């Protein structure tokens, strides 16, 4: 018999779509909450469009790989909440749930008649988490975001890149990932608070706003010291400081050299490693790992100040050495000597080549009816009493409609069939998947 | 309602934080939401206090702005865990705590006789969270780390960088700001909260082994799925998403020399082009976009490069970034100005949400503006209850006031470097 899970007996009504919201409820599901994902195929925005469907499969609502990874441990109820009947069913579900979570644009749920006041009337201690772009208050609450916009507007994009070049920014929606985590953090915090006080609440999480506290030290350097980040040498790429510019913190840790990315053998697109020496002692260890070359004994590299000043030359000479080694070989050599070094890893590297992630069982397969057995990302923490382990692959759209409508909400089988006939549980005229025909028998 | 502010959602919880740069943000998240976080530092202070930038650029353990930011809403004591006396006081404090958060190398606390098993044996309701670079087990568990190292091995760098046209031969670029520590802290916070919820039901604590490497490896959106389902390795592109093959740019230089992110590519329907034409026309810059030929999707597809590289780029080049941001958003475009963080101080929307907080530093006779909350808890507000502690600031308050030591004993402990 499986052991207890942290969120046993917690039910979540999940109106989320696209990425940030589903990434939030994914973690509530990993902790054992029952996640009921409410979906409607006519305006679905997470399963389609799909750029992660395997080449040999048809792109349809049930074949997105990224959807599968983002929606493990959930159930799917297909329900048209934009009809009066559908909304009534959603309300019956809310009445027996603990958390309502959504990531629509600000105030959409309110317009449906499901604002916090109504939710609390239905279920007085409900924890309601709204995950919008700009939040439910403030003059720009109607603005919309995707990850890249939240990152741009909040300053996250600007502080990543090389000096005197356009911002490199983030190569994905970091704030969909992170906004999702904040959604989950808010839900868990609200749930804890409810369990202690008996009181629910509305938590107004906003993607753009959640980005700003991630720039704390940059902001304090401005509000306290008056130093802005539009200055020569900033951002300094992978370095802690750009040579030839005033020496000051770049908000990534100690201002040291070496602190950079270096090409490794055999020179492919992701054949890079990074090396950081945080003290003269660590530098001497690196010198020894490199075989104590003559150049490294030069007085100009003897202390951190000299290494910072002569970084261009230093980095070039270090790279001459790193190019002779594979990135994993180099990592093992450096780390066994107490030198901070790791490989740049692609997705393939992480899944196939990273011995640590393999040991920690980061990617374990789950069986999916359309996609087959596929590795799914696991949680980055081990809980001793209530392990957060993936149990089920993502649901097919509407897969659990019957068990929720009849089993949980107590409607009759005739009600279910009527709801399919009148377009409440599936659009009339839209072809049904085989498993839907099965549930209507 | 005025005067009364309800407590934060974590009021009543006590956290002992033994954390450096890897875990101090997690302690802040807990403290700002109302937990009583006691930061336990080695005598002389946590080494993170030596990280700049410093107040007025004068280095001092009580003037690190990085330390200030990540240690709000905490009290601070010093304790030498290498001494028996220090361990004894720690154990006494742990028996009053709900959560112990630690970032030492795996096995360190256990080697001192105050590991999680021993603490939990004496206090079964205790939640102990170890947040370390690679977790407590595995071939890399004793490896050294740094933010840059996590950005490399976690996969962030493989997805970030430049188009060859912008920076030929550019390296992968690690995003700035110390986000490896944020990623680890967010997941550790979640695990701690799940443990707390479970404890409200069961009364039982537990041990959490959290890994920053795994947190970072989880934070590259679809990159893992692109590999697992399609075998793809993604390329790096300037200021926009990684991709299996090159995609049109989304970052354009504005008149003031900054940039605008305009998500146009992949969205060019006839309706979108019509809206674009209206936006551009409001500045007299519609050019040929009103041409009826753009009512046809195929014509639009054939002219994508013209629309993006000539018209969108030209429009943005003609106006300041902030003006474009608001004008475009007002018309429903999901566009944004690429701002430097300090520009956020002028953001009216954040002011409407009372985002910025004045934090008093009484020993300096000054107060400073800090960033505020990621989310508004309408029933139990977030707040910065105090500025970061000075070194050992609460030694007397906690060791004498709570654990009952006399002032004489406190002095003796200081002389023998126990505190």
Image (cartoon, rainbow, N blue to C red):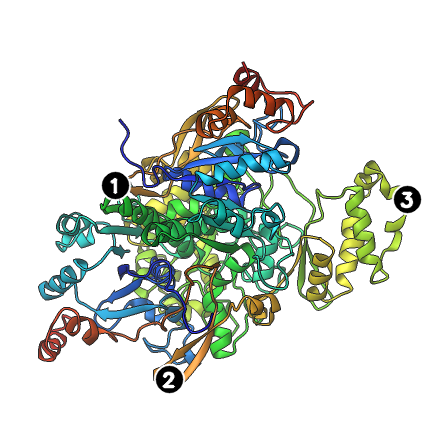
At mark 1, the secondary structure is loop
The residue closer to the viewer here, A205 or A127, is A127
| Residue at the disc numbered 1 | A384
Quadrant including the N terminus of chain A = top left
Q: Read off the chain for label 3.
A: B
Q: Residue at x 58, y 56 (%)?
A: A150
* Image vertical order of residue A351 relative to residue B414, above or below: above
Question: In the image, are marks 1 and 3 on the same chain?
Answer: no
Asked if disc 3 and disc 2 are in contact, CB closer than 8 Å, the reply is no
| Residue at the disc numbered 3 | B292
Classify 10 Å Cα crowding around label 2: few (below 14), some (14-19), many (20 and above).
few
At mark 3, the secondary structure is helix
Q: Pick out the residue farthest to the right.
A: B292
At mark 2, the secondary structure is helix
Asked if disc 1 and disc 3 are in contact, CB closer than 8 Å, the reply is no
Q: Earlier in the sequence, mark 3 or mark 2?
A: 3
Q: Is residue A341 visible?
A: no
Tell me how far mark 1 sits from mark 3, CA to CA: 65 Å
Tell me how far mark 3 sits from mark 2, CA to CA: 66 Å
| Residue at the disc numbered 2 | B364
The percent position of residue A123, horizontal first and vertical second, equals 45, 45
Position of B42 with respect to B313 (left or right) is left
Q: Which mark is residue B153?
A: none
Q: Pick out the residue farthest to the bottom.
A: B365
Tell me how far mark 1 sits from mark 2, CA to CA: 45 Å
Quadrant including the C terminus of chain A = top right
Q: Read off the chain for label 2.
A: B
């Amino acid at each position: 018999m499986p052991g207890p899970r942290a969120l046993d007996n917690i039910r979540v009504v999940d109106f989320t779509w696209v990425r940030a919201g589903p990434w939030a409820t994914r973690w509530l599901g990993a902790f054992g909450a029952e996640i009921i994902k409410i979906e409607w195929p006519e305006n679905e925005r997470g399963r389609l469009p799909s750029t992660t469907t395997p080449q040999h499969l048809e792109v349809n609502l049930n074949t997105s790989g990224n959807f599968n990874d983002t929606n493990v441990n959930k159930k799917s109820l297909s329900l048209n909440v934009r009809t009066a009947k559908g909304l009534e069913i959603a309300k019956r579900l809310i009445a027996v749930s603990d958390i309502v979570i959504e990531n629509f644009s600000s105030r959409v749920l309110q317009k449906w008649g499901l604002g916090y006041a109504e939710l609390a009337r239905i279920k007085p201690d409900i924890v309601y988490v709204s995950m919008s772009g700009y939040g439910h208050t403030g003059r720009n609450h109607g603005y919309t975001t995707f990850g890249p916009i939240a990152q741009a507007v909040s300053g996250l994009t600007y502080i990543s890149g090389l000096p005197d070049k356009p911002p490199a920014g983030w190569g994905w929606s970091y704030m969909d990932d992170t906004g999702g985590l904040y959604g989950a953090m808010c839900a868990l915090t609200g749930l804890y608070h409810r369990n202690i006080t008996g009181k629910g609440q509305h938590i107004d999480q906003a993607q753009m706003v959640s980005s700003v506290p991630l720039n704390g030290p940059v902001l304090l350097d401005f509000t306290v010291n008056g130093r802005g980040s539009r200055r020569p040498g900033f951002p300094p790429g992978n370095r802690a400081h750009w040579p030839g510019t005033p020496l000051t913190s770049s908000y990534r840790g100690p201002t040291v050299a070496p602190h950079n990315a270096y090409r490794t053998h055999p020179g492919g697109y992701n054949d890079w490693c990074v090396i950081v020496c945080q003290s003269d002692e660590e530098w001497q260890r690196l010198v020894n790992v490199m075989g104590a070359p003559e150049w490294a004994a030069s007085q100009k590299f003897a202390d951190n100040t000299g290494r910072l000043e002569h970084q261009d030359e230093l980095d070039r000479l270090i790279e001459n050495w790193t190019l002779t080694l594979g990135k994993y070989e180099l990592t093992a050599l450096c780390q066994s000597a107490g030198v901070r070094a790791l490989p740049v890893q692609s997705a393939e590297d992480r899944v196939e080549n990273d011995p640590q992630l393999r040991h920690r069982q980061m990617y374990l397969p789950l069986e999916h009816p359309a996609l087959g057995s596929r590795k799914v990302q696991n949680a980055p923490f081990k809980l001793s009493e209530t392990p957060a382990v993936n149990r089920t692959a993502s649901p097919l759209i509407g897969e659990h409609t019957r068990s929720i409508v009849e089993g949980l909400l107590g409607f009759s089988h005739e009600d279910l069939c009527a709801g399919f006939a009148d377009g409440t549980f599936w659009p009339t005229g839209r072809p049904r998947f085989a498993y839907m025909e099965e549930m209507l028998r | 309602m005025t005067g009364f502010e309800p407590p934060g959602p974590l009021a009543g919880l006590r956290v002992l934080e033994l954390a450096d740069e890897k875990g101090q943000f997690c302690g802040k998240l807990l403290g700002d939401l109302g937990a009583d976080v006691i930061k336990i530092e080695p005598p002389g202070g946590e080494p993170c206090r030596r990280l700049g930038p410093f107040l007025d650029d004068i280095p001092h353990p009580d003037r690190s702005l990085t330390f200030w930011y990540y240690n709000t809403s905490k009290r601070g004591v010093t304790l030498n865990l290498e001494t028996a006396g220090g361990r004894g006081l720690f154990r006494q404090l742990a028996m009053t705590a709900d959560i112990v958060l630690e970032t030492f190398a795996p096995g360190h606390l256990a080697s001192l006789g105050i590991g999680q098993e021993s603490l939990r044996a004496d206090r079964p309701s205790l939640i102990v969270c170890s947040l370390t670079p690679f977790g407590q087990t595995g071939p890399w568990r004793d490896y050294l780390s740094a933010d840059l190292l996590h950005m490399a091995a976690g996969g962030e760098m493989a997805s970030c960088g430049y188009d060859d046209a912008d920076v030929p031969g550019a390296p992968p670029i690690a995003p700035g700001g110390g986000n490896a520590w944020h990623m680890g802290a967010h997941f550790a916070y979640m695990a701690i909260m799940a443990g707390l919820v479970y404890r409200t039901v069961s009364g039982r604590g537990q041990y959490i082994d959290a890994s920053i490497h795994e947190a970072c490896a989880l934070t590259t959106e679809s990159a893992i799925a692109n590999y697992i389902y399609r075998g793809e390795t993604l390329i790096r592109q300037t200021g926009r998403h990684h991709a299996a093959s090159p995609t049109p740019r989304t970052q354009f230089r504005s008149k003031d020399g900054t940039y605008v992110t305009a998500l146009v590519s992949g969205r060019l329907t006839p309706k979108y082009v019509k809206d674009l034409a209206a936006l551009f026309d409001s500045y007299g810059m519609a050019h040929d976009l009103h041409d009826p030929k753009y009512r046809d999707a195929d014509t639009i597809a054939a002219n994508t490069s013209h629309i993006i590289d000539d018209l969108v780029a030209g429009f943005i080049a003609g106006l300041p970034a902030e003006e474009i941001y608001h004008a475009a958003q007002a018309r429903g475009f999901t566009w944004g100005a690429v701002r430097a963080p300090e520009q956020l101080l002028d953001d009216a929307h954040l002011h409407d949400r009372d985002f910025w907080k004045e934090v008093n530093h009484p020993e300096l006779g000054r107060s400073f503006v800090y960033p505020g909350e990621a989310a508004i808890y309408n029933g139990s507000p977030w707040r910065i209850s105090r500025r970061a502690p000075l070194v050992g600031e609460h030694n007397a308050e906690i060791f004498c006031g709570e654990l009952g030591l006399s002032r004489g004993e406190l002095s003796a402990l200081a002389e023998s470097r126990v505190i």
